[in-house]
Image (cartoon, rainbow, N blue to C red):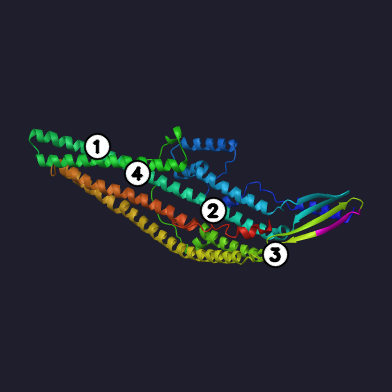
Amino acid sequence: MNNAQSFMAAFVVFLLGGCATFSEDGGTRQVNDALSKRGITQQAPWIKNKDDATRAGDQVRALLAQPLTADNAVQIALLNNRGLQSAYAELGIAESDLVQAGRLRNPGFSFGRTHRADDIEYERAFIFDLLGLLTMPLRTQLERERFELAQSRMAASILQVAADTRRAWISAVAAQQSAAYAEQVKSAAEAASELARRMVKAGNFSKLDQAREQAFYADAAAQLARARQGALAERERLIRLLGLWGNDIAFNLPERLPDLPPSLRDMADIERQAMQQRLDVQEAARHAENIANSLGLTKATGYFSVLEAKYIRNSESGQPRKTGYEIELRLPIFDSGSAKLARAENTHRQAVNHAADLAIRARSEVREAYGAWRSSYDLARHYRDEIVPLRTRISEETLLRYNGMLMSVFELLAESRQQVGAVINAIEAQRDFWLADTSLQFTINGKSPGAISATGGSLRAAAPAAEAGH
């Protein structure tokens, strides 16, 4: 075997051994690990084929066959939300880029034939991308970091859908509970209005008092209509997040919100928790590191965009065969790479400052969310332990006086109206606490509600440099 054949054999072995492959799970194991560390126990599968879709559909229908809890609603959303499946496609794209970065560009072969008089000359060349080989380790590392960023974004998307679904479930149950109470109020007001009409007819009630009762009934009917529309709107918002349609939308919600916890758990050093667990903070830091590595590649390839090696084998009629090699290098005469380097440096500065700004905002947001969580719990407990029981005792005392003929029926009804406002406020305060609880967990683990993606639009800011080896 001559030197050329040895070189070709070694090259083929290297090429086959260096080809990167796809992972079995598509990177979803790391996503699920990140979610489990942040309290998400529900499954969030990547639905790739008909069998996956069938299994997910069967699980969704089984969950819908019983009254829908908050945890089951989150599970249905993670199984059925099309937006998440779109985000999974981005994860697959990122892995494809990683695999591509670990593969060499296909070698080239050129063939030429020239002749003059009776002489024929053949020229053959085997072309190999030498710069791609030299920069492959760094390009692969860059794409691996970008793949990890895609996994982080996927976990953040799942957390976002889970939080939004839980909020929608809380609002839907509270709206349904308020509508049911508004129905009772309207029925009571209707009975009072009819009683006032009969008493006026009997001459035992003034028309002014009758008008007041009719006005209260009309207002109760309007409030019921608003409550029903609010319940419908909140339910439809939940349906959209669950990705349901057709007969599946006829699910049942619990009649009331969960009770308040007996006490709040201790949450010391929540700022440190947010810095360690918030996905957007981690993503911004990783993105800045990725840009720094891209900057290193830009500097390494800034002057040379093409570096190719050729193995040449020529033959001519009646002449000995000629072999050799050729190296092609683009000279930086018109483009020295300074613009590309300046772009990469400014992109790195942008990423570093964005990460620092996001960390400051994350600390503030988690403190704000914690304050809302504490105050909403205290307010909801105040309504539960003080205001509603007090209104109940007043109603009971009013009823005793009515039974003792010390108070008219309309005074009794007037007191009942006061209790209406207290009950509605209690429902809203309970709803606000559970919403604040969801928001606090998401603020610690997820991302800023108004944050701009740390990598959106700039993830591949240094891609031209990274692709220089191609």
Alpha carbon distance from label 3 to label 1: 88 Å
| Mark 2 and mark 4 residues within 8 Å of each other at the beta carbon | no
Read off the residue under disc 2.
153
Amino acid at pointer 2: Arg
Residue 385 visible in this rendered orientation of the protein: yes
Q: Which percent across, then down, holds residue 337?
A: 63, 65
Read off the residue under disc 4.
175
Question: Residue 157 or 140: which is nearer the viewer?
Answer: 140
Segment tinted magenta in the rendering: 319-325
Comparing labels 4 and 3, the label whose residue is closer to the camera: 3
Read off the residue under disc 1.
187
Alpha carbon distance from label 2 to label 4: 32 Å
Amino acid at pointer 3: Leu
Task: Give the side of residue 125 with respect to residue 245, left or right.
Answer: right
| Mark found first going from the N terminus, 4 or 3 | 4
Classed neighbour count for the residue bearing mark 4: other residues with Cα under 10 Å, few (<14), some (14–19), many (≥20): many
| Mark found first going from the N terminus, 2 or 3 | 2
Tell me the SS state at disc 2. helix
Tell me the SS state at disc 3. loop
Residue 331 is tagged as 3
